[in-house]
């Protein structure tokens, strides 16, 4: 019953995505299964930290990353914080828990040259799928939207005349994003191809499969990885790296952090600041070339 109330709270009050809510539920149910199997407990609401500590040790022994262990522990901590808030328990058993140390995750954005190559030098097919794939890359790079936001983009959210799209982001927060002329042209070309499909099942959505059904996350990941593998030797090639590239390139060109924050749909500057480390090298170049002392050396 407590878990059901917590899941409802995440969905209805916190307005977390289905994917996020499912992750929380899976983590908590996995812990409940551990408590039942190892300690014969029928419920987890009243467990104390030593049992949770045992669970964490087992997770570490199973060779999953510290980052994953921290995520699972954070799910459990949120659950107990909720129970404390509704008066079900007096103290959160994870209140004083310290997260495991993790190595800093470095995500390298695509370079200007790599973006030019993937958008201008690759020969895309001139059929529906080729035009769709080109648009997906263009839209991810020029707007910085998330993969899920792209997949759920609806026809009614596209304003070609105003060069705008409306995006439904995390926690159902809407934001309006400007479109570059090149993106508007790509959308117009795609819409012509889309209209010629024999059958359109998911009529409300922008991005479709050739069968007329809405596209899906795995497909978007595969096509980004496939096309960028032709122009880049970077290990990680994903839709998120394109979002990362969008932010980094804007900052490198002088965009202020607050503007990038709004475009990305971040709730705080702290989330956006992870992209600034890539701009430091560029700032050093500008500083060295523009500052009088730099020019003398």
Image: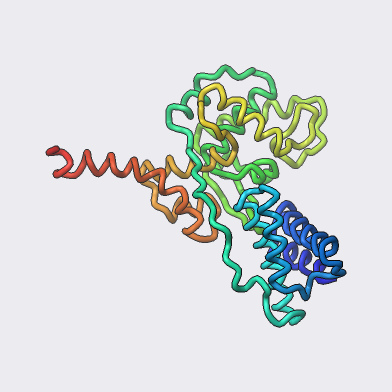
Residue 244 image offset from top left, x and y in percent: 51, 42
Extreme residue in the left direction: 296
Above or below, 253 relative to 9: above
Q: Residue at x 19, y 44 (%)?
A: 291
Q: Above or below — where is 199 with respect to 125?
A: below
Residue drawn at x 54%, y 60% is 267
Q: How many marks?
A: 0
Q: Quadrant of residue 89?
A: bottom right
Left or right, 38 with reference to 15: right
Residue 184 appears in the figure = no
Q: In which image quadrant can residue 127 be found? A: top right
Residue depicted at 14% across the width and 37% down the height: 297
Q: Is residue 22 above or below residue 278?
A: below
As rendered, which of 40 and 21 lies closer to the eye? 40
Indicate the quadrant where residue 280 lies. top left
In front of the other: 137 or 157: 137
Q: Position of residue 229 (x, y in %)?
A: 57, 25
Residues 113 and 191: in front is 113
């Amino acid at each position: 019953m407590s878990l059901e109330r917590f899941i409802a709270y995440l969905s209805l009050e916190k307005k977390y995505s289905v994917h996020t809510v499912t992750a929380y539920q899976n983590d908590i149910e996995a812990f409940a299964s551990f408590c039942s199997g190892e300690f014969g407990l029928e419920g987890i609401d009243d467990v104390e930290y030593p049992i949770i500590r045992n669970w964490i040790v087992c997770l570490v022994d199973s060779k999953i990353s510290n980052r994953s262990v921290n995520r699972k522990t954070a799910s459990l901590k949120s659950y107990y914080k909720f129970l404390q808030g509704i008066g079900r328990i007096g103290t959160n058993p994870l209140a004083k828990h310290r997260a495991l140390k993790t190595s800093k995750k470095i995500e390298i954005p695509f370079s200007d040259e790599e973006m030019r190559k993937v958008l201008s030098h690759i020969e895309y097919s001139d059929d529906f799928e080729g035009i769709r794939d080109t648009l997906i890359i263009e839209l991810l790079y020029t707007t910085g939207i998330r993969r899920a936001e792209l997949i759920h983009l609806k026809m009614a959210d596209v304003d070609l005349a105003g060069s705008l799209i409306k995006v439904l982001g995390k926690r159902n927060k809407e934001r309006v994003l400007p479109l570059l002329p090149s993106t508007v042209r790509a959308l117009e070309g795609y819409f012509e191809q889309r209209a010629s499909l024999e059958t359109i099942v998911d009529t409300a959505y922008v991005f479709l499969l050739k069968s007329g059904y809405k596209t899906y996350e795995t497909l978007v990941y595969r096509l980004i990885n496939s096309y960028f593998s032709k122009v880049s030797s970077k290990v990680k090639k994903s839709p998120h790296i394109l979002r990362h590239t969008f932010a980094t390139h804007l900052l490198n060109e002088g965009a202020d952090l607050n503007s990038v924050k709004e475009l990305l749909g971040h709730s705080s500057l702290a989330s956006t600041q992870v992209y600034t480390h890539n701009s430091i090298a560029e700032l050093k170049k500008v500083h060295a070339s523009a500052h009088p002392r730099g020019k003398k050396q």
